Amino acid sequence: MNGKSGLFSSIGKLESAEISALLGDSILHRPSSVELGWKDFAIERRTILPGDKSAVELEQYFLILWDVRIAEGESAYRSGHFSPYKKYPNTITTCLPGIRPAAHSRVDHEVIVGALHPDFILGIEEELDKRPSGGFRPLFGTDAPDLRNLLRLLLKESETGGHSGLSTPTR
């Protein structure tokens, strides 16, 4: 996306405004893919700080890889009631476009987050010989080794400034 409201708009140092909005109070570790100019996709290593997170409306798709240690907290559901959550290291949760409910994290969480703009998803689908029959599948702390490995490879590419050879400059 281009322009001030795009996936790659920056806040302070170069980071994804959309990932910042999704996670609330968090700390970016190492460079963001935003610095590479990737179009419609961002990936970052973050620490989500403990505390309350307000509900937020999402326009992108997000992949969250829970890293390092167990993440615990509560997430809102019907009528403002909260339900506990526990995410284990190396599992993946998706956040799809729509409302991400309010949450409360008890401790800091180490995560790797990928943000995908709907145009990015559409572009991938258009390149396939056969389009998928369903939509983007929700995951809630799921063990998905191939997806986990892909996220780690993309993060490595981002954090090394494209030195692994996967990045191509945008024009």
Image (tube, helix red, strand yellow):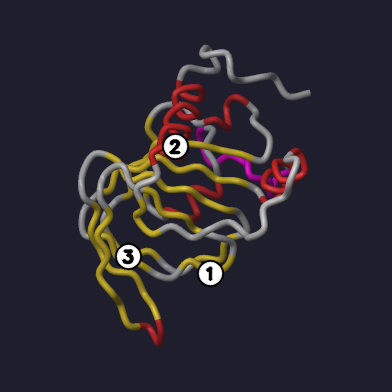
Residue in view at x 60 percent, y 24 percent = 36
| Amino acid type shown at disc 1 | Ile
Where disc 1 sits, the SS reads strand
| Amino acid type shown at disc 2 | Asp
**Vertical arrangement, residue 17 with respect to residue 56, above or below:** above
**Vertical arrangement, residue 164 with respect to residue 73, above or below:** above
Q: Nearer the viewer, residue 39 or 26?
A: 39
- Which of the two discs, 2 and 3, labels the residue nearer the N terminus? 3
| Predominant SS of the magenta segment | loop
* Count of picture labels: 3
Q: Check residue 9 for magenta coloring.
A: yes
Residue in view at x 48 percent, y 33 percent = 150
Q: Nearer the viewer, residue 98 or 47?
A: 98
Which image quarter holds the C terminus?
top right
- Which of the two discs, 2 and 1, labels the residue nearer the N terminus? 1
- Which of the two discs, 1 and 3, labels the residue nearer the N terminus? 3
Q: Which residue is mark 3?
A: 52
Q: Which residue is mark 1?
A: 99
